[in-house]
Image: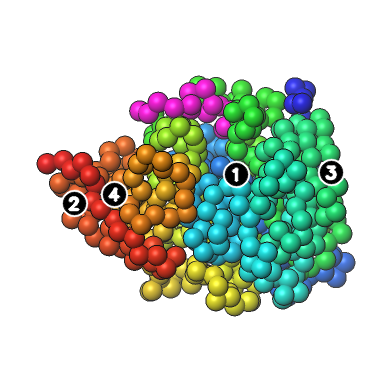
Amino acid sequence: MMASAAEPKLLNDSPLDPNPTRRQWLRAATGAAAASSLDAAAPDSPAKPNIVLIISDQFRADNLGALGHNPLNLTPNLDAMARRGTLFRSAFCNQPVCAPARGCMFTGQYPAKHGVWRNGLGLRTDAVTLATELRRAGYSANYIGKWHLAPNTGLASRGPVDPAHRGGFLDLWEASNELEWTSHPFEGDLYDGDGHPIHFNGIYRADFMTGRAARFLKRARGPFFLTLSYLEVHHQNDIDKFVAPAGYSERYLNPFVPRDLRPLPGSWPSQLADYFGCVAKMDETVGAIWKLLDENGFGKNTIVAFVSDHGCHFRTRNTEYKRSPHDSSTHIPLVIAGAGFDRALEVNELVSQVDLAPSLLEAAGLPPPASMQGHSFLPLLDRKTDGWRNEVYFEMHEFVTGCGLRIPGWTYAAAAPKRPGWKAAPSADLYVESAVYDVAADPFQHVNLAGRADARTAAAELRGRLLARIEEASGARPSIEPAWFPYP
């Protein structure tokens, strides 16, 4: 049952200064130098950097003030993190739905390879993941929050997760396989490594999870890998509502409306204020995590990455919130700061979730395993762009069976025809061109050029590129037909 009382204060939620002066920067630098003399008294400061991965569910990329598309100042902490670290302006998911996207993040593989092509499936028990590789190198692998990568075999499988299905996270485990079904925003359960419930009540779910992170960091020894997988800012499934802490939604009544949503019917008129309230709270949570790292002596030798599994189009592109080829579904935030990433840098090249695991492994001084299909984006930080394939391949399942390609100027997608008896499948032998968007001319993807005569040359080239990526990702060799309803 959800509480209606104001959320208790668990941590100091004051954000990082979003607009520091030169004097403030100098003061911070002086403080950092002074803090270095305390290293001997701090927890272990290993040569290998600690890694904290923060996942926020269903977080649109354009929520980030640093991207310049939303004027509401929803994310001062993330914006400060972006100024300090590295902001990836063009990060995309490889399948816009929870479980498959998370599989991509941890395995560095596309859904066709890691096998979790829809929600409810589990990673293979022998999967090679970011966690397994870091543990092999002496890291502990710790997880708090939503998992969604164990097989769903019924109601009992929504909460506790057997160690064999934890993807290599075999140290601290305080998680729920499907947290959206074992909790509400002010009440619910995580489960410990033995499957026992860790109950919370009367505290906002994100704050409770951050409190568990605080307990871990107080006694942690490096090097450690900690994933904090928040359900926020995802809607609460059983009530179909975004639930922010008390007073947060009220800040955003009659708010700025993202331009991709404005001309389209959907749920955004009634949900945007609540969603933005959740975003603002999630940003405060990021600030709280940085504060905890600094207080426990880990701030200088820790990589912190913030990412989402997919975006949110508020039922403007289909009858739910994602599972479409549009940027509102696929464009995700990716901000990384800390050891090795404090470059005050913006990266414009396209990157995706399959690139995250190999990049973090390389940042830890480890070679990515051959099983990973993604590529380390660390060379981009040094502006070594030669050889970088500036495109993202993605898959779509459940709502449609399809796939697509995002390149700097275009979005191209194809889907299997929904003939009588159609049902969700991991692949198809035949796809038909379904979406062609000239993103340079139509950045909010309102005019679908599939079948239009003036887009056929571009579509033909993209069709060939997509076929090559399908074969590379899965080994399959389907056919893609041009749009069945051409326009003159």
* Residue at which label 4 appears: 433
Element assignment for label 2: helix
Tell me the kind of residue under disc 1: Asp
- For marks 1 and 3, the one nearer the N-term is 1
Which sits in the foreground, 258 or 17? Answer: 258
Relative to 223, is 449 on the left or the right? left
Binning the other alpha carbons within 10 Å of mark 4 as few (below 14), some (14 to 19) or many (20 upward) gives: many
- For marks 4 and 3, the one nearer the N-term is 3
* Callout 1–callout 4 Cβ contact below 8 Å: no
Residue 326 position, x and y percent, is 40, 44
Tell me the kind of residue under disc 4: Glu
Highlighted magenta segment, given as a residue range: 263-277
Asked if residue 72 is positioned above or below residue 389 in the image, the reply reads: above
Asked if residue 300 is positioned above or below residue 90 in the image, the reply reads: below
CA distance for labels 2 and 1: 36 Å
Element assignment for label 3: strand
- Is residue 448 on the magenta stretch? no
Residue 100 position, x and y percent, is 55, 53
- For marks 4 and 2, the one nearer the N-term is 4
* Residue at which label 3 appears: 197
* Residue at which label 1 appears: 57
Question: Which numbered tag is attached to residue 456?
Answer: 2
Element assignment for label 4: strand
- For marks 1 and 4, the one nearer the N-term is 1
Which sits in the foreground, 392 or 370? Answer: 370
Question: Which numbered tag is attached to residue 260?
Answer: none
* Callout 4–callout 2 Cβ contact below 8 Å: no
Tag nearer the camera, 1 or 3: 3
Residue 99 position, x and y percent, is 59, 50
Tell me the kind of residue under disc 3: Pro
Tell me the kind of residue under disc 2: Arg
